[in-house]
Amino acid sequence: MHKLLIRGGKRLSGRVKVSGAKNACLPILAATLLTEQRCLISNVPALKDVETMLSILESLGRRVKRRGGDIEIDQGGVTEVTARYDLVRTMRASIAVLGPLLARYGEARVSFPGGCVIGPRPIDLHLKGLRELGAQITVEEGYIVARAKKLKGARVYLGGHFGSSVLATANTMMAAVMASGETVIEDAACEPEITDLASFLSGMGADIDGAGTPTIRIRGVKSLSGTEHRVIFDRIEAGTYMMAALITDGKLDILGADISHNIALVDKIREIGGMVKEGPEGVSVSRRSRKIKPADITTFTYPGFPTDLQAQMMSLVSISGGISVITEKVYPERFIHISELNRMGANIILEGATAIVKGVGRLSGAPVMASDLRASAALVLAALVAEGDTEISRIYHLDRGYERIEEKLSGVGADIRRVEE
């Protein structure tokens, strides 16, 4: 097991390249189950979650070849429809194989998924979407079992208590592409990752309109072919590096960052005293004002402020010149990082699903523990600006979503290294 050692106080400067989007890549990899033919997917990040998904595909009878950022997948030998507990338990996105297995083989058995401990994340919308398409779903010995002789197009409403769901939209899309007739998904997730999945499926021969809007129309086809596809860049990683530039009062050119994918974050960055300039290769980020200004932030589904950037923003405004209010509308219990930030000198009070952040003059290094993926990134940002040394343990969470983060940050001036626990 590894930990990160970070000595704060270094201004970041230079160019950092964003990797492929984890949250786009995982459902795209799952979608390769819809065809017998070869698929080549490029710009795939080297992440623990990606390796988990590839292991699941291999367990389901696929041949997987990796060459750098390129993944080649084709039909292997025995076809299996059970995604085993020992593989699925570590990653929530494993549920993405449910829809394509059901569409292709008429049956799927997927263990209840695991992942970060950030509060309840029910899969009811996934099951609702598949049921609307004609699936019979039971729970047997800890496995979700879905069966359907033939899926049929339907009008499916996927609005949930906290808004739309990216993975539920993806699962319903992947099941619907081979259903008979037309499927209309209402209150669909609008994230760029859904648009990227639709692009991949269209390359396979699917008939999809409206991806990126709340209404997606899918006309089922009898079969899908192999294709080649390049995954979009990771907007959450890009946003994390944008805030790294601001928290250290540095300047970073973030290659691959797309302003249109992070418009809510860019708006808040400008509000708190940052500058974001768009260029041909990405964006350039630096401070406009000497001191970070406070802000009121509410997370919501896309194009609202991303829940996956809430923890990092909390680190940033913890050194602001005033009081910030951060309300979590997507995962109301996603605040485990508060106690660790307070250990570093932050002044944060939690009231229900709202955090009151009173800016402090400085943070100080301390031994802290990562609790989930984005909390890990928040601790890294806080450590970059803290006085003294910070030791972050349990960084296996970080490796699920950030490719070589210590190498990328050290390349732009951070004093950061990975060591054995």
Image (cartoon, grey):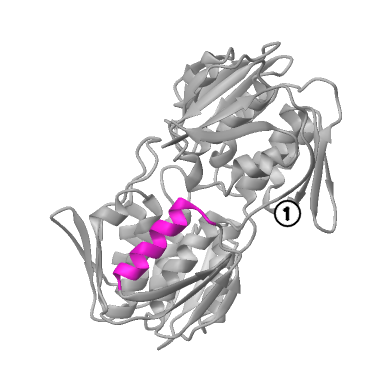
Above or below, 195 relative to 362 = below
Taking the spot 56% from the left edge, 15% from the top edge, the residue there is 344
**Within the image, what quadrant is residue 147 found in?**
bottom left
Report x, y in % for residue 122.
33, 46
User: Secondary structure of the magenta portion, mostly?
Assistant: helix
Membership of 297 in magenta stretch:
no
Residue furthest to the front in view is 420
Report x, y in % for residue 306.
58, 42
> On the picture, is 218 further left or further right than 250?
left
Membership of 52 in magenta stretch:
yes
Report x, y in % for residue 18.
67, 52
Report x, y in % for residue 71.
51, 70
Frontmost residue, 87 versus 350: 87
Highlighted range, magenta:
46-60
Read off the residue under disc 1: 258
Taking the spot 76% from the left edge, 23% from the top edge, the residue there is 292
Taking the spot 41% from the left edge, 48% from the top edge, the residue there is 160
| Mark 1 nearby-residue class (10 Å; few <14, some 14–19, many ≥20) | many
